[in-house]
Image: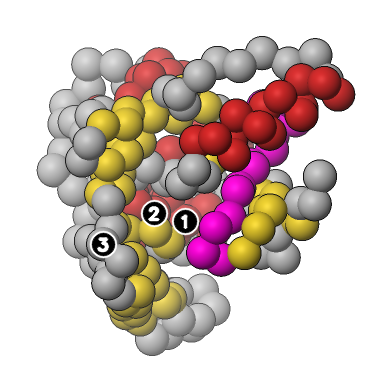
């Protein structure tokens, strides 16, 4: 049908030029179709139904554990139900809440001498939290920081993860809101770094954030 696979995201296919482009995102047998012209979307649906047995679920409202709300102000993305499931998995329902996901200036090490913990449970929690980052960039740094220690896990590492979960419990309704960017919206990036902050390797940590207008689009 004239689609080309994105060179940057293998699940995304595009048809048309930059000013008039039809985008399709594919995950197994689920598709998201978007275009500024609704008629082009309808034509594609007809073509797809001729080739495959498909169901049209209408306006996107839920996709891969991400809830989508669309209105005149823009698009809001939430993972409230998914976050609750993580808390259930960890036994943290009803826990005391924290206002930050990480202790200030927290420094952990692979060489910790305290008692080790079950690595399977820890890795499951970290994997779940990494998926929650899709709509909660406020936990991105600490979750990826804790991902460094999945090879050897101690009570210190588990306590730090519980701190993240206590924060998630108090931010269940947090998410991303992408407003309608004007045609003049600028693409702006920010970065920060902590030189040689890793106590084990002396490697540095760098963070980046990119906005299209007021919308955070990559971090």
Question: Can you tell which of label 2 and label 3 is closer to the viewer?
Answer: 3
Q: Residue at x 73, y 16 (%)?
A: 54
Instruction: Tell me if label 2 and label 3 are in contact, CB under 8 Å.
Output: no
Membership of 52 in magenta stretch:
no
Q: Quadrant of the N terminus?
A: top right
Q: Mark 2 Cα within 10 Å, few/some/many (few <14, many 20+)?
A: some
Q: Is residue 126 left or right of residue 45?
A: left
Label 2 sits on residue? 140
Residue 172 makes an appearance in the image: yes
Quadrant of residue 166 within the rendered picture: top left
Q: Tag 2, which secondary structure?
A: helix
N-term-proximal mark, 2 vs 3: 2
Label 1 sits on residue? 144
**In the rendered image of this protein, does residue 162 appear above or below residue 134?**
above
Instruction: Tell me if label 1 and label 2 are in contact, CB under 8 Å.
Output: yes
The kind of secondary structure the magenta stretch mainly shows is: strand
Question: Can you tell which of label 1 and label 2 is closer to the viewer?
Answer: 2
Q: Residue at x 22, y 36 (%)?
A: 72
Q: Quadrant of the C terminus?
A: bottom left
Q: How is the image coloured?
A: secondary structure
């Amino acid at each position: 049908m004239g689609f080309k696979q994105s060179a940057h995201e293998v699940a995304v296919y595009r048809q048309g030029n930059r000013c008039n482009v039809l985008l399709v995102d594919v995950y197994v047998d689920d598709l998201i179709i978007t275009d500024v012209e609704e008629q082009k979307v309808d034509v594609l649906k007809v073509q797809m139904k001729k080739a495959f047995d498909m169901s049209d679920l209408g306006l996107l409202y839920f996709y891969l554990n991400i809830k989508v709300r669309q209105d005149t102000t823009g698009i809001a993305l939430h993972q409230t139900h998914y976050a609750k499931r993580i808390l259930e998995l960890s036994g943290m329902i009803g826990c005391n809440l924290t206002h930050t996901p990480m202790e200030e200036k927290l420094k952990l090490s692979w060489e910790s001498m305290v008692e080790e913990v079950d690595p399977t449970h820890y890795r499951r929690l970290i994997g779940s939290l990494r998926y929650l980052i899709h709509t909660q960039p406020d936990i991105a740094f600490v979750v990826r920081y804790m991902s460094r220690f999945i090879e050897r896990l101690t009570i210190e590492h588990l306590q730090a993860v519980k701190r993240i979960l206590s924060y998630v419990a108090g931010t269940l309704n947090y998410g991303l809101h992408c407003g309608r960017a004007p045609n003049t919206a600028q693409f702006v990036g920010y970065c920060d770094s902590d030189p040689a902050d890793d106590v084990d390797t002396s490697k540095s940590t760098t963070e980046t954030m990119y906005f299209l207008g007021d919308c955070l689009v990559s971090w």
